[in-house]
Amino acid sequence: MLDRFQFFPRAWADDVFVLNNDDEVKTTQRLLEWLNSTNTQSIKQHLEQAIIQYETNSVFSGLLVNASTVGGFELATIPKLRNEDGEVIYPSESTSYDDIVNKRGVSYDFDLQDAIRNKRVATTPFIINARSTYKSLASDLVISNEDAERITRSTGTREAMNKAGVLIVVAI
């Protein structure tokens, strides 16, 4: 029950949507304008589709894998990137052997912000988080099936990744 000075029911009081800067306000205003102009039943579904459209059609300059929280990861010249089912995402059949030999399979960095600015992944990297190492292979990283699907769906990411545009952030 709402009292006359309460805008949200007490159960929802801790889940208030907070805007932190002008960009978030502008984005929220655009969403509200869009919602007011459409008769959409499933907002979540439409927003997920917009994200998929962006990731599929955008040109990403490389793949940045944040493995800074993965314990036991061992650096390797060409580590494998796998989904949760163990399927290898990188390197793939499309990965250029010449690029791997001449540019190294991956590069490593110790800081996420430095890695984002690294020329290997350049200005618009596709960023994902590693979850763990794969079984007893300490140089193979596991990513979520969802992230693996996002990578394979994105032509720009696959092209950059297969030209050795991969950077892994590791813990010190």
Image (cartoon, rainbow, N blue to C red):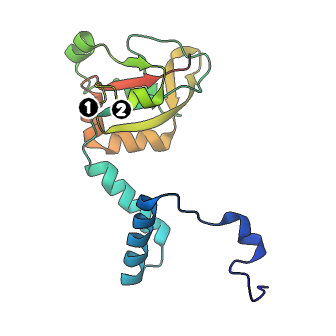
Q: Secondary structure at mark 1?
A: helix
Q: How far apart are the two marked residues, 1 and 2, measured between alpha carbons?
A: 7 Å
Q: Secondary structure at mark 2?
A: strand
For residue 110, above or below residue 31: above
* Numbered-mark total: 2
Q: Can you say which quadrant of the picture contains the N terminus?
A: bottom right
For mark 1, what is the residue?
160
For mark 2, what is the residue?
63
Q: Is residue 122 left or right of residue 130?
A: left
Residue 92: percent from the left, percent from the top? 32, 26
At 49% across and 40% down in the image, what residue appears? 145
Near-viewer residue (73 or 118) = 118
Q: Amino acid at mark 2?
A: Leu
| Residue, far left | 98
Residue 13: percent from the left, percent from the top? 72, 69
| Residue, far front | 22
At 22% across and 17% down in the image, what residue appears? 99
Q: Are marks 1 and 2 in contact (CB under 8 Å)?
A: yes
